[in-house]
Image (cartoon, helix red, strand yellow):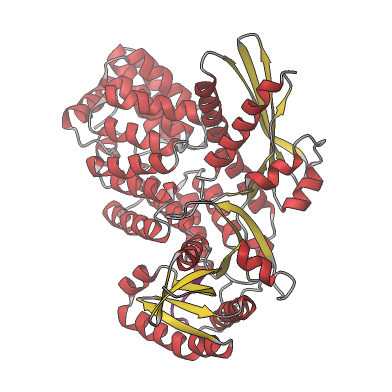
Amino acid sequence: MERRLAAILVADVVGYTRLMGQDEAGTLERLSAVRSKVIQPLIAQHHGRIFKLVGDGLLAEFASVVDAITCAIEWQRTLIQGRVTSDGKKPLSFRIGLNLGDVIVDGDDLLGEGVNIAARLEAQAEPDCICLSEDAYRQVAGKVEAEFEDLGNLELKNVDQPVRAYQIALSGAVQPAGVTPTPSSSLKKPTVAVLPFHNLSGENDQEYFADGVSEDIISALSRNRWLMVIARNSSFAYKGETIDVKKISSQLGVRYVLDGSVRKGGNRIRIAAQLIDAASEKQIWAERYDRVLEDIFAVQDEVTGAIVAAIAPELDKAEQQRATSKKSGNLNAWDVYQRGMWHLYKRTKEDLTEARKHFEAALSQDPCLSLACSGLVDAYYYEVVLGLTDTPAENCERALRTARMAVELDPDDAAAHCAMGKARIVSREHENAIPDLKLAIELNPSLAWAHYGLGAAAVFLGNADDAIPHLEGAIRLSPRDQHMGSYMVRLAEAYLLKHDYPLAIEWGRKALQQQGFQWSRYAVILAGLGYSGRTEEAARVFGECLIHRPDFSVSMVRRCHLYTHAPALEHYLDGLRKAGLPE
């Protein structure tokens, strides 16, 4: 068996299946042109050879890592520059993985772990970027002009040991024609460093518990694919040091820092955590968790889940605030997406229209931004459930199509599968939504909307007992979520199904106190009041709702609600009639 050391480059087209679905002939023509005019000449120029073509991708071998990385950089820069002066056709975007490793020679083909690692790194690379192993990085550091981002240790499929990896993000990589390129650092996802939690117990045997909490948070936060989490080895380098947020931010290149402490006393333990915006050094979230220490691992899992679920929406809010405060002429795709989210949560007809425009603009800048697809699904969803569109069937079709695009762009993203669940729910395919939402929870157990989605599907199917645990779980997971009004109104409707009208009214009123307008918050209160015989109070609530929705009526609720269980819907509508609503 012949073996040798080689630099292996693996590349493929981002979103190839979607591009083929939209324009098969044109995509094949562009891929053939890029291969013949750009890729093959560059590989030959840098003394490499293509040893395998796989559909939209290829594998190439180089004797020198420096030649391989130089070829990859010129490849990406050439295509990016061509995109800026594009003729309007959909551009091709590539991911590239590069590894230096031992390979097995099989005729003209190469096999072995050296090839496998390069392929797995290619899958980890962001669009228009190059992801390389530490072995390759050591050979090229200081020899090529490029900015390397340390990705930490990555768990790669079918690779026994974690692989330290680095990424090169080329300046202007996601800018469309007519947009001034911005530095690559401004294009990155928000980045957070989880520092080792301090052991304040005075007991050395609690050190492992404090470290365990930090490690679990790092692991769990990493499941949010819109967030870049610094690897454990890098953040734990600050263990035992006095915290200097500015210094840590500069050295690790992070926007946010999570710090915390653990204190044990008797059979009780207190875990405190705070999230800090590194630029302003302001605290944007803090919480304290007191627990009885019966099963230390159960406590560790419970508190980790609570912290991660609380942090994600707070980071989302901070990113929206940061994006809306920037000047409009200096926005990258991520900023545009966050502006869309800011409009989305207002849930007026005008704001949902603006949200869609922002998500579409973000996708025009970065066609591979899966989260912008998920945001579009949200906008279509709310326009239907709030009764703000004249074409609900068209919205449902667009939501399903866009959700499929999100899943195709990132099959491992929980938010993408959650978007598919939303699209199926708004299309009244509740049974079909359940597998999508369960998969989203498998990928990210802390994703509150996926838990809510399971509860909402159960409500619309008339299964109150199945719905309540999921809805309560969503509220418990993310107590300051911007979707909280939706979580609470569905819980109110679940209690309405159970004929527990006091609780239905109570949760409906709690929902009214949350951000954004939803007519269903008024509707569930009115149905509860109707069944309780409180008609005078119902008249006041109905008057408040008419200010926002002059067309509010029994027929409007019938048209807009997502129930597919006829008895459940009729029970709801009868309550509204008893409250005095017109047909």
* Residue 105 in the figure: left or right of residue 315: left
- Residue nearer the viewer, 281 or 263: 263
Q: How many marks?
A: 0
| Residue at 52% in and 59% down | 358
Residue at 72 percent across and 75 percent down: it is: 145
Q: Is residue 540 magenta?
A: no
- Eyeballing the image, is 149 above or below 313? below
Identify the image quadrant of the C terminus.
top left
Residue at the limit of the structure toward the left, as seen here: 566
Q: Is residue 526 above or below residue 52?
A: above
Res 318 visible: yes
Q: Give how far across and how far down residue 498 sits, in percent.
A: 27, 18
Image coordinates for residue 575, horizontal then vertical, percent: 26, 22
Q: Is residue 167 visible in the rendered structure shown here? A: no
Nearest to the observer: residue 315 or residue 180: 315
Q: Residue at x 77, y 52 (%)?
A: 251
In-image side of 341 versus 406 (left or right): right
Q: Is residue 340 above or below residue 508?
A: below
> With 571 as the anchor, is 483 left or right in this view?
right
The secondary structure that most of the magenta stretch takes on is loop
- Kindly indicate the quadrant of the structure image that contains residue 171: bottom right
Q: Position of residue 186 (x, y in %)?
A: 67, 61
Residue 573 point in image, percent of width and height: 24, 28
The vertical placement of 11 against 35, above or below, is: above
Which quadrant: the N terminus? Answer: bottom left
In percent of the image, x 40 and y 57: which residue is there?
406
Instruction: Name the outermost residue toward the front.
Output: 1
Q: Please name whichever residue, 30 or 284, is drawn nearer the observer in this view of the structure.
A: 30
View extreme (top): residue: 266
Q: Which residues are magenta?
A: 88-96
